[in-house]
Amino acid sequence: MTTLTLPRGLDRPRLADAAQRYGVYAAVLALLAFNGLFTDHFLTVDNLRTQAVQVAPVVIVALGMALVIGTEGVDLSVGSAMALSGALLPLYLGYGLLPALLVSLLAGVVVGLVNGSLVALVGLQPIVATLALFVGGRGLALVIADGQLKQIRNDDLLGLGTDSVLGVPLVVWIAAALAAAVAVLVHRTAFGRRLVAVGGNRQAAALAGLPVRRVLIGVYVICGVLAALAGVLATARLTASDPSSLGNLMELSAITAVVVGGTPLTGGSVRVLGTVFGALLMQLLHATLVTHDLHDSTAQMVQAGIILVAVYVARERRTR
């Protein structure tokens, strides 16, 4: 009886490693090629511009989520942080754009401090610690806004959502700059090396004298600030503050982008470029399915399948 075996270069662990490292890039290229052949007007400048604008806030939030997941954590409150920052904007725009932006970003700092303190100082599991603000943060945003949608009429703020530089939307430039900054933070700074060490083995990091608590709090603060900034940009693009819907399910979109991009849920690694492409993949996939007259529910089921595959591949690579 003969047994079918893979060539040495194509054994299962190597395939799993290649799939996690390069699968998201290949998938994006495959989707672009498919749409170029079978979807009319998909690869036009206007449509690609629209896709980039829509995915930019997801990229910004996912960058913060990648840092948190790199420490073997998770932040379920990013959508609420977006809603809080959006609710605060109209209240302080009368004092000028800069004070309003500072207050909105400060809300993200507070959310991050609360989450980070509960995880690092109290010792709560991240999913439990951030669940409190997942529920309470949006409720607070609704109280601040009196439960009402408020139109934004500040031209300077609206420009953040509509202006372009060299033909590229400003929100896309912001997302790209933040991706570069996070990549430098992870790969070129002591904080980034400590972050990865804490995620790889928190006890060993503590025994080595690393400031584990400060790293954890710092990571959650960065995540909260990025979520608040995404809330500002989304509010500017929508020309209205709507805390009931702003950032709704954003935490799931961000986690999906991070996992599909190759960052393991078990921590110890952060794939910044993979996270960006993960967000882009899910955006292109959704747009492709909708363009071909498939219902949103079908698109969500396909996305769920991709998440399961990504988690399975990561598990295969870790247990090889």
Image (cartoon, grey):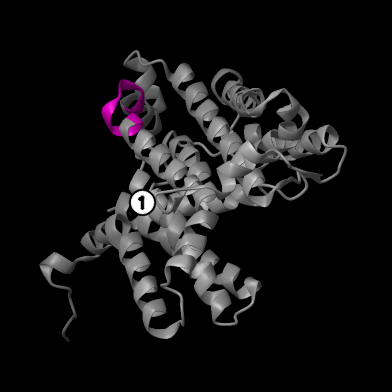
Q: Residue at x 75, y 34 (%)?
A: 90
Q: Position of residue 57 (x, y in %)?
A: 54, 47
State the residue in front, 124 or 226.
226
Q: Quadrant of the N terminus?
A: bottom left
Does residue 311 appear in this view?
no
37 shown above or below 252:
below
233 shown above or below 288:
above
State the residue in front, 22 or 231.
231
Q: Position of residue 272 (x, y in %)?
A: 36, 44
Which residue is most to the right?
A: 146
Q: Residue at x 31, y 27 (%)?
A: 193
Q: Which residue is mark 1?
A: 274
Asked which secondary structure carries label 1, the reply is: helix
Instruction: Say left or right for 159 vs 138.
Output: left
Instruction: Read off the magenta span.
Output: 185-192
Does residue 100 appear in this view?
yes
Q: Amino acid at mark 1?
A: Gly
Q: Residue at x 38, y 78 (%)?
A: 36
Which residue is most to the top?
A: 209
152 shown above or below 252:
above
Q: Position of residue 8 (x, y in %)?
A: 11, 67
Tally the marks.
1
191 shown above or below 16:
above
The crowd level at tag 1 (other Cα within 10 Å; few <14, some 14-19, many 20+) is many
> Quadrant location of residue 117?
top right
Q: Residue at x 39, y 47 (%)?
A: 263
Q: Position of residue 185 (x, y in %)?
A: 35, 30
Q: Is residue 123 magenta?
A: no
Q: What secondary structure prevails in the magenta region?
A: helix
